[in-house]
Image: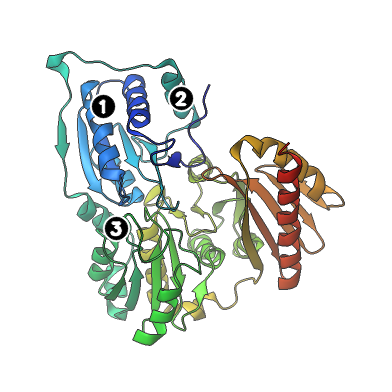
Amino acid sequence: MTRLFGTNGIREVVGQQLTAPFVTRVASAIAAVTPIGPPIAVGWDGRTSSPAFARIVAATLAVGGHDVIELGILPTPAIQYNVRALGAQLAVIVTASHNPPEFNGLKCIAADGLEVTRATETAIEDAVDAGRVAVAPYDRIGSIGARTDGARRYVDGVLAQVDVARVRARRFTVALDCGNGASVPTSPMLLGRLGCRVVSLNGQVDGTFPGHLSEPTIEHVADLCRMVPVIGADLGIAHDGDADRSVFVDATGRFVPGEEILTLLAQDQVQRHPGGVVVTPVTASQSVEDAVSAAGGSVVYTRVGSPTVTHAIQERHAVFGGEENGGLIFPEFQLARDGAMTAAAVLDLLARRGIGLADALVGLPKYTLLKEKAPCPVAQRAAVLARVAETVGRGSERVVTLDGVKVYRDGGWVLVRPSGTEPLFRVFAESKDPARARALADAGLAAVRDAVRATAA
C-alpha cells in the first residue's frame, strides 16, 4: 500500500507529485469510500493552485454522486467549524498549511470536525492503490453549491467563547500579520468585533507569499516585530498559511516563542478547570509540565501531529492541548488547532488580568528550546532514524521513542524525528542553560547529517 497521508494530510510539490490526475485519483477514492448521504464540504487556502485543485475535488465528488458545498478560502479551523455547523459528513481541504509556496495538499475532516482517523486515511490509500472510482448515473450526479457565510459563522463561534465586552473595554491596538494567507477573511473581522484597533500587514491573499514564507518563525515575522513598538501596539499576532496557528509579539517588539504561549494558556486553563488534563506532543517544553503541575493539573504526551493530539484530548477529556509551534486547541470550542481562537483567548486573558502580554509571561518556568532541521531524502528516513537512535542514545539518562528518539542527559534533552510533511529531520533541544541547549541541538544535527551520509550508499 502506498502511504499518502503524513502527520497532517497529504502534502506534495505542485506539478511534480501533486498534479491534476493525482488529485483526481485521491478525490475519486474519497468519493468511493464515503457513503452517499449528507453533503461533503470543500474548502481551500490561498495558494496559487488551491482553487483549481478544489474544483477538481468538488467535480470528482459530484460525478461520484455526492452533493458538495464549496466554502471558498477559509482558515482550516473555520472549515472544521463549518463542517459541524452545516451538517456535512466530511470536508476535503486543499491546503499545505505552513509549507513553502511550491507545495499543496489535501486533508480530510470528519463530521465531528476532527481530522479523520488513520483508519479512514488507510481506506482512502487502499482505494487509490486499487484505482477505485465512484460512478453515478446521469440522474444521480451530485449538486455543487456555494456558501459564502462561513467566515461570519466561524467568527461568531469564536466570539461566543470570550468576554467580548471586557475585551472591547481594553481597546487593544493589535498589529496583525495575515501572512497573505487564509486568515484574511476572518482574523481582521474577529479583532474588529473585539473592539481592537487593527493595523494589518500582508493583509491580501496571495499564494506566492510575497511578504514572507508562510511558516511564522522569528525570521519571517521580523517586519511585525519592528512594527509593533513603532505604532505603539499592545501586541502583534501572526498566522501561518492556513491560520490554524498564531504566534505573538509583545509590546516591546519581542517575538514570543510558541512554547511560552502554550505554557501560559495551559496554566490558565488548568487554573480555571482545577485538576484538568493538558495534552501536548513530545516536542513540548518542560515548562508546560512544570506550570500545569504547579496549578494542580497533569500532562499527557503524544506523537507530533494535530490529529494525534486532538484525538487524545477527546479520549482524555482534556481541558486544553496543543503544540509549541502556535497550534493550540480549545476543546470547549472545537477539537482543532485554531489560530483565531488562540488570538481571542490571549486577548481575553490579558483583559481579565488587566495586564500586558510581557507581564503575563513573567513568572513562567524559563527554558531555552531550540528548533533546527536537517534535510533527508524520504527513502532514507528509517535507516537514518535507526542510526541516530544508536548515536544519541549512548550514555543517556532516559530514552523516549514515542515519536522519533528523545534522550535526556546532562540537564536537558534532545529530540530527533523525521518530518511528516517535508523531506527533512527536525531537531529539538532544551535546557535551562542556553549554551547547553545549543550543544544538544548541535549534537542532534551532527547525528542526522552523519547518518544521512552513512546511509546514502
**Cα distance in 3D space between marks 2 and 1:** 17 Å
Residue 255 visible, this angle: yes
Q: Nearer the viewer, residue 333 or 234?
A: 234
Residue at 52%, 29% in the rendered image: 3
Residue 352 visible, this angle: no
Residue extending farthest front = 457
Label 1, secondary structure: give it: helix
Amino acid bearing label 3: Asp
> Pointer 3: what residue?
206
438 on left or right of 105: right
Hey, which quadrant is residue 198 in on the image?
Answer: bottom left
Label 2, secondary structure: give it: helix
**Cα distance in 3D space between marks 3 and 2:** 31 Å
Residue at 29%, 38% in the rendered image: 53
- Which scheme is used to colour this image of the protein? rainbow
How far from the left and from the top, in percent, is residue 19?
Answer: 36, 34
> Pointer 1: what residue?
60
* Disc number placed over residue 329 in the picture, else none: none
Q: Which of marks 2 and 1 is nearer the N terminus?
A: 1
Q: Nearer the viewer, residue 247 or 11?
A: 11
Q: Which of marks 1 and 3 is nearer the N terminus?
A: 1
Q: Disc 1 or disc 3, which is closer to the eye?
A: 3
Label 3, secondary structure: give it: loop
> Pointer 2: what residue?
125
How far from the left and from the top, in percent, is residue 67?
Answer: 20, 28
